[in-house]
Image (cartoon, helix red, strand yellow):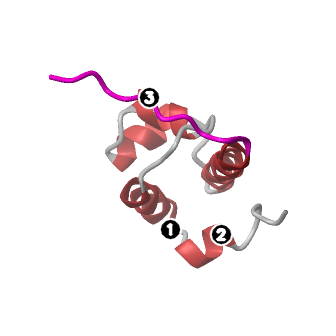
Amino acid sequence: MPAKKKVIINIEDQKLLSKLANRIKLLRIEKGHSNYEHFANESGISRTQYGKYEVGENIKFLTLTKVLKNLDVSLQEFFSEGFDE
């Protein structure tokens, strides 16, 4: 099996992923989920992987929609704040 190729992310993309991470974390806490590990388990996502998303690792779109569904937040609502330049 070939080794997984490491993807290099530029500064602009890193900033965007950081904004996404901050927004996910803020909404999780606002919705009353103080423990990210419990929220990850409730969402069907490994706690280790979910923790990476909250610090800015790239998240797949379908995983993001799963997280938002469990937060009862629409995509429109999610992207309505925190992404201004």
Crowd rating for badge 1 (residues with CA inside 10 Å; few <14, some 14–19, many 20+): few
Query: In the picture, residue 79 is in which quadrant?
Result: bottom right
Q: Is residue 9 magenta?
A: yes
Seen in the image, is 3 located left or right of residue 59? left
In the picture as drawn, the residue positioned furthest to the right comes out as: 85
Helix or strand or loop: what does disc 3 sit on?
A: loop
Residue picked out by circle 3 = 6
Crowd rating for badge 3 (residues with CA inside 10 Å; few <14, some 14–19, many 20+): few
Tell me the kind of residue under disc 3.
Lys
The secondary structure that most of the magenta stretch takes on is loop
The tally of labels here is 3
Tell me the mark number nearer the camera, choosing from 2 and 3.
3
The CA distance from mark 1 to mark 3 is 33 Å
Q: In x, y percent, where is residue 35?
A: 56, 35
Helix or strand or loop: what does disc 2 sit on?
A: helix
Tell me the kind of residue under disc 1.
Asp
Q: What's the magenta region?
A: 1-11
The CA distance from mark 1 to mark 2 is 14 Å
Q: In x, y percent, where is residue 27?
A: 65, 56
- Which of 50 and 37 lies nearest the eye of the viewer? 50
The CA distance from mark 2 to mark 3 is 28 Å
In the picture as drawn, the residue positioned furthest to the left comes out as: 1
Residue picked out by circle 1 = 72
Sequence order check, earlier mark of 2 and 3 = 3
Residue picked out by circle 2 = 79
* Marks 2 & 3, CB-CB < 8 Å contact: no
* Quadrant housing the N terminus: top left
- Which of 18 and 69 lies nearest the eye of the viewer? 18
Q: In x, y percent, where is residue 55?
A: 63, 34
